[in-house]
Amino acid sequence: MKSKTFLLIIVLCAAIMSCQKNPDIDRLDNDYLVYTNYDSETDFKSLSTFYVIDSILIIGNDDKASYWNNNNSQKIVSAFRTGLEGAGYTYVASDEAPEMVLQLSYVNTTYYFNSYGPGPWWNYYPGYWNWGGWGWYYPYTFTYSYSTGSIIGELVNTKAPTPQNDKLTVIWNSYICGLLNGNNLSLSRTYSAIEQAFKQSPYLTNK
C-alpha cells in the first residue's frame, strides 16, 4: 500500500476519535478502523512457528520502556495468538526458536508522526523492544500518525536477517484504532478488530 493511502487511512481513524466536540458514544461503540500491511517478498507458507511477547509495550511520554501486563492485556495477547493459530501456525515458547515473533504495542497518551525508511526505526520510540538484541525494520516506507488508544501489532521473521545491518524484517503489521469507549479501552470492540485484522490478511496463512 502506498504511503499516501496509509496516511489517509490514519487521518480517517483520527477523525473517528475527534471529529465531534461531544461525540455520541453509543454511535462510536461500533466504529473502529483496522489497517494491515505485509512484506510481499515473504513466503508465509514457508513459516510454521510463532511466539507472542506476553507484555504489551506502552508507547507514551516516558523516557524508558514500560509494559502493560495484566488480565486485560493477556486477553488481547491471547486474541492475537488465536488469530495466528487459526491461520495454521504453531505457538512455541520463546526458547524454542520461533520462526516469527509478534510484538504488540499500545498507544497510551501521545501521538507520533514520523516518516522512516532504512535505519533504526526503534530509535524514534522511547525504549523500543528488540528480539534478543536484534532490531527490526519495515521493508516499506510510509508516513503515519498513531491515535491514543490504538493497538499496533508487528510480526517479524527471526530466521531471515536482512542485508540492512542484519535487522529483522517486519513481515506483517496491523494498526487498530477507534477502540476507546470514553477513556476506557473496549475489549469487545478490540476482539472484533483483531478478528478483522486476520480476516483482511488472507496471505497470512500456513494452510
Image (tube, grey):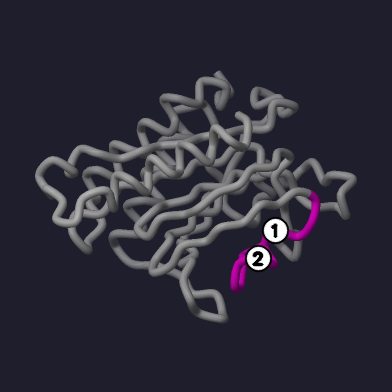
Q: Residues within 10 Å of mark 1 (few under 14, many from 20)?
A: some
Question: Where in the figure is residue 24, as x and y percent of width and height?
Answer: 11, 48
Give the residue displayed 60% in from the left and 67% down from the top. Answer: 125
- The answer to whether residue 130 is magenta is yes
Foreground residue, 99 or 14? 14
Give the residue displayed 16% in from the left and 51% down from the top. Answer: 23
Give the residue displayed 61% in from the left and 48% down from the top. Answer: 101
Quadrant assignment, res 29: top left
Quadrant assignment, res 157: top right
Is 33 displayed left or right of 47 in the figure? Answer: left
Q: Amino acid at mark 1?
A: Trp
- The answer to whether residue 207 is magenta is no
Give the residue displayed 29% in from the left and 41% down from the top. Answer: 191
Q: Residues within 10 Å of mark 2 (few under 14, many from 20)?
A: few
Could you give the CA–CA distance between mark 1 and mark 2, rounded to whole angstroms? 6 Å
Q: Contact, CB < 8 Å: mark 1 with mark 2?
A: yes
- Mark 2, residue position: 124
Quadrant of the rendering where the N terminus is positioned: top right
| Element assignment for label 1 | helix
Question: Where in the figure is residue 81, as x and y percent of width and height?
Answer: 44, 42
Question: Where in the figure is residue 30, as x and y percent of width and height?
Answer: 20, 38
Q: Amino acid at mark 2?
A: Tyr
- Mark 1, residue position: 121
Is 9 displayed left or right of 183 in the figure? Answer: right
The magenta span reads 118-131
